[in-house]
Image (cartoon, grey):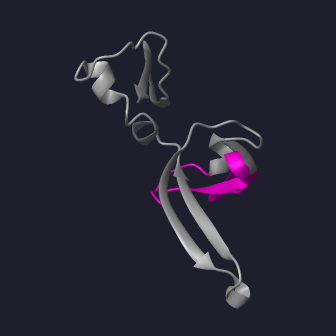
Amino acid sequence: GIVRQLEDDFAVISLPNMFSGYIRRKSEKGEPPLTKVISLHQVLATVVVKTASEAAAGGVTTRRRIELSILPNQVNAGYDRLLTGDITGDANGLKIRGRISSIEDHGTVVDV
């Protein structure tokens, strides 16, 4: 999806078919605000974590709330069996997402 609105604690993501999803910042101590991690109009790989429907004012229309995640371990969840050889398939050219978890003296540690 594409980041349509960005705040410190949440981001609104435009999805196909005129849907919108939401990313919330974790409330963990030391977690940077989303405005420091992503930018407006950035294209992100996301995965649906939770969906909910609620009646709008007057009960005439139904609003859908789609909660998304950009965490690499959730976005890459289907790839682990392919990469370990549990299922057969061609992994050449496969793109996986990661995030730098720490910078070391001789490289970086990437969370996938």
Does 61 sit above or below residue 49?
below
Q: For this rendering, which residue is in front, 6 or 20?
A: 20
Q: Quadrant of the N terminus?
A: top right
Q: For this rendering, which residue is in front, 110 or 43?
A: 43
Residue displayed at 46% across by 38% down: 75
Does 91 sit above or below residue 75?
above
Residue at the extreme left: 86
Magenta span of residues: 5-33
Residue at the extreme front: 60
Q: Is residue 25 magenta?
A: yes
Task: Point out residue 103 in the picture as x, y percentages from the top left corner.
Answer: 47, 25
Q: For this rendering, which residue is in front, 43 or 109?
A: 43
Residue displayed at 28% across by 17% down: 88
Residue displayed at 55% across by 42% down: 46
Q: Which quadrant of the view contains residue 2?
A: top right
Residue displayed at 42% across by 12% down: 106
| Residue 49 shows in this picture | yes
| Residue 8 shows in this picture | no
Q: Which quadrant of the view contains residue 20?
A: bottom right
Task: Point out residue 95 in the picture as x, y percentages from the top left corner.
Answer: 50, 21
Describe residue 3's horizontal placement relative to residue 71 as left or right: right
Q: Is residue 29 magenta?
A: yes
Task: Point out residue 109 in the picture as x, y percentages from the top left corner.
Answer: 41, 24
Residue at the extreme bottom: 58
Q: For this rendering, which residue is in front, 50 or 89?
A: 89
